[in-house]
Each structure stands twice: as C-alpha cells, then as structure tokens.
Amino acid sequence: MPLLTLLDYAGVAVFAATGALAASRKELDIIGFLFLASVTGIGGGTFRDLILGAPVFWVGDSGYVAICAAVAVLVFFGAPRVESRYRLLLWLDAVGLSAFSVIGAAKGLALTGSPIIAVVMGMLTAAFGGILRDLLAREDSVLLRPEIYVTAALGGAAVYTLAALAGLPPPACYVAGFLVAFLVRGGALRYGWSFPHYRSRPGRRPEDIP
C-alpha cells in the first residue's frame, strides 16, 4: 500500500475517533457516534474534493466509510475507560490535522500544479472536519482555543509543498510535512503557544473627531 494512502486511512481513522469521542462527551447513542465519526473523518476531504472538482474520495472507495463506522463502534464501547476524553480528543485531533495537511496538499498539488492551491487545500482538508465536529457536537471550536491550530496545518502543508517542489522523494515529503504540523500543534497543546491576541480600543465619539 502506498505511504500516502496509508496516511490517508490513518488520518480518517484518527479524525473519526475524535468525532466519536465528541459523541461520547455528549452521551449520544450509537447512531450519533456513527454520524459524528463519519462527518469528522471524511468531512475535510469531501470539502477539498468538491472545491477541486475532483471525484469525492470516499465515493470511489467505501473503505473510508467502513473505517469510520468501525472506529465509532470501538469508541462507543471503549470510551468509558478513558479518564480524560477531551484531552485525548485534542491529541488525536493533532495527529489527524498533521496527516490531512499533507494529504490535502499532495492532492491539491497533483491536480492543479499550483503551490498556493496545494497549501490552501492542505489547510482546509486538515481543519474542516474538526470544525464540523465541534459545530455539530456544540463543543467549543478548536479554532477558538488560544493555542495555534490552523497555522500548524498551514506549516505542514507548506513544508510538504516546498519539499515536493525541491524534488525530494515522496516519503520524505510526507514525513517532513507531518512532523512539522504535529510538532507545532503538539507544542501548542503542551506549552500553550499562541499568537498575540487582538486588543480592541473604544471607538471615538463623533464630537471628538476633529
């Protein structure tokens, strides 16, 4: 099995697990687990393929949906044994984010040849599934957490794209992009890395404007 395909399956499985963990936090039934796992696992890739005008990846390979279903069932029975589900969700999300940043960039570069489109597709593929999961589960969005998130996906996609354009072997490109994204996101989770926040100031009254 090609490394990129293996990484794709792994990314879907890990993101599906985060969707199922979100369902466990909301104490949903098995159908809720299956739904959230599937939306999270294949949502980002579906969004990417629709934008690119490409065949939706899981329509041609139902194995992706089967992976989501299997993970949902495993988490349904295994989640009660996990003490801190939200922390596990965040770390699994970091793994899925890293994998999908590379997968999205690789597909964007292969279909368009544009480095900019490749980086954008990597970022969207990595972030969209988690956004859908948090929206549907009514969890605080990962985008609104103080730590770096989208930037990690952006970094992984950019490193993969630069490595591919430099002519490095594909496995080296995949590993480099994945590691950069995971180290940035993992460091943000572990050490609270973040960018300076916007500080608003009260607007001036009309009579104060000269």
Image: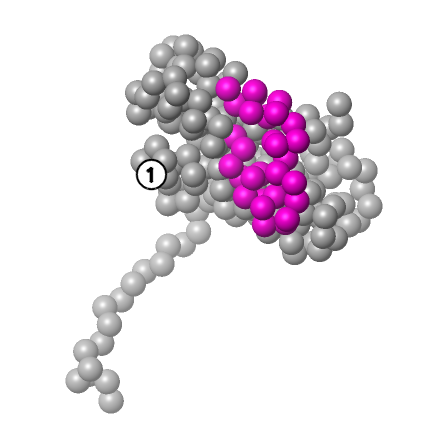
Please name the residue shown 54% across and 43% down the image. Answer: 47
In the picture, the quarter occupied by the C terminus is bottom left
Can residue 91 be spotted in the picture?
no
Q: Position of residue 108 (x, y in %)?
A: 67, 47
The residue stretch that appears in magenta: 41-69
Describe residue 58's horizontal placement relative to residue 128 as left or right. right
Q: Quadrant of residue 83?
A: top left
Please name the residue shown 70% across and 29% down the image. Answer: 5
Residue 68 sits inside the magenta stretch: yes
Q: Quadrant of residue 4?
A: top right
Q: Is residue 98 above or below residue 120?
A: above
Going by the numbered disc 1, the residue's amino acid type is Asp
Q: Which residue is mark 1?
A: 140
Please name the residue shown 40% across and 54% down the image. Answer: 196
Q: Position of residue 141 (x, y in %)?
A: 37, 40
Q: Is residue 5 above or below residue 209?
A: above
Q: Nearer the viewer, residue 123 or 107?
A: 107
Q: Quadrant of residue 203?
A: bottom left
Q: Label 1 crowding class (10 Å Cα cut-off): few <14, some 14-19, many 20+?
A: few
Principal SS element in the magenta part? Answer: helix
Please name the residue shown 72% across and 52% down the image. Answer: 112
Describe residue 166's horizontal placement relative to residue 72 as left or right. right
